[in-house]
Image (cartoon, rainbow, N blue to C red):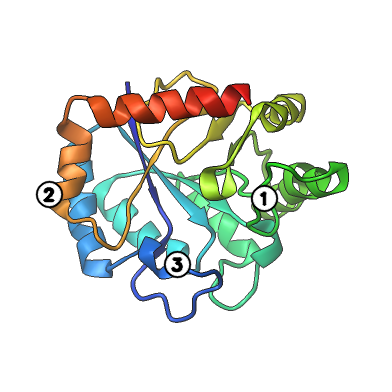
Amino acid sequence: MNVNLCFHGIGVCEREREPGEARYWVDADRFRAIADEIAAHPGVRLSFDDGNSTDIDVALPVLAERGLTATFFPLAGRLGEGGSVAAGDLGVLRASGMAIGSHGWAHVPWRGLDSAGLARELTDARTRLETASGASISEVALPLGRYDRRLLRRLREAGYTAVYTSDRFPAREASWLRARYSVTAEDTVESVRWIIRHRPGIGEARHVLASAVKRLR
């Protein structure tokens, strides 16, 4: 079983694009300390959602210094916008040993979208990100962690080989649906160490059950 940790912005969130976004930004010095802790645990897998410019400005140098790798899930519709990575940054990330996945186009929940909306989020977004990064994309991270049976079927039909959620329990590396723990502004080295080291308990069992309900609804 692996622990998948997900980060969003690093540093100070100067402008929230969505209510509550600042909660998912981690202080830069704290991020460096957390990265030191993660480097001591080979079973931890890292990812970065949303494609904030701090992915390339802050996260990449910190990861490189510690010999860590991660999968970056940018938003295709934000490439080149202020505060977001540029299209050319995706090639830099790949050249540095990082992987690129898709987080869709506009950071909207995919559950309940009509066929046109799903085509933009699942297909058009991937095409733009593949063009920008210069390689194919087979992994996807669900915006806001929402999903149901219909959406998972569409993702399988689209050919994605791994789908990342925000369900907060350890995941098997070979699983198609992979739960992650989002690291937030309130987290510390100690809280992240606890996530990595503790044995799954009642809290994780509730999240596993909730995931099962989502897959069936």
Identify the residue shown where x is 16% and y is 42%.
193
Task: Single out the mark in the foreground, 3 or 1.
Answer: 3
Instruction: Residue 112: give x, y in percent of width and height.
Output: 73, 43
Q: Is residue 10 above or below residue 194?
A: below
Q: Which residue is mark 1?
A: 104
Of label 2 and label 1, which has the lower sequence position?
1
Residue occupying the far left of the picture: 190
Q: Which residue is mark 3?
A: 20
Secondary element at image label 1: loop
Of label 2 and label 3, which has the lower sequence position?
3
Residue 146 in the figure: left or right of residue 123: left
- Name the residue type under label 3: Gly
- Name the residue type under label 1: Gly
Residue occupying the far right of the picture: 116
Q: Is residue 136 above or below residue 17?
A: above
Instruction: Residue 183: give x, y in percent of width and height.
Output: 32, 52
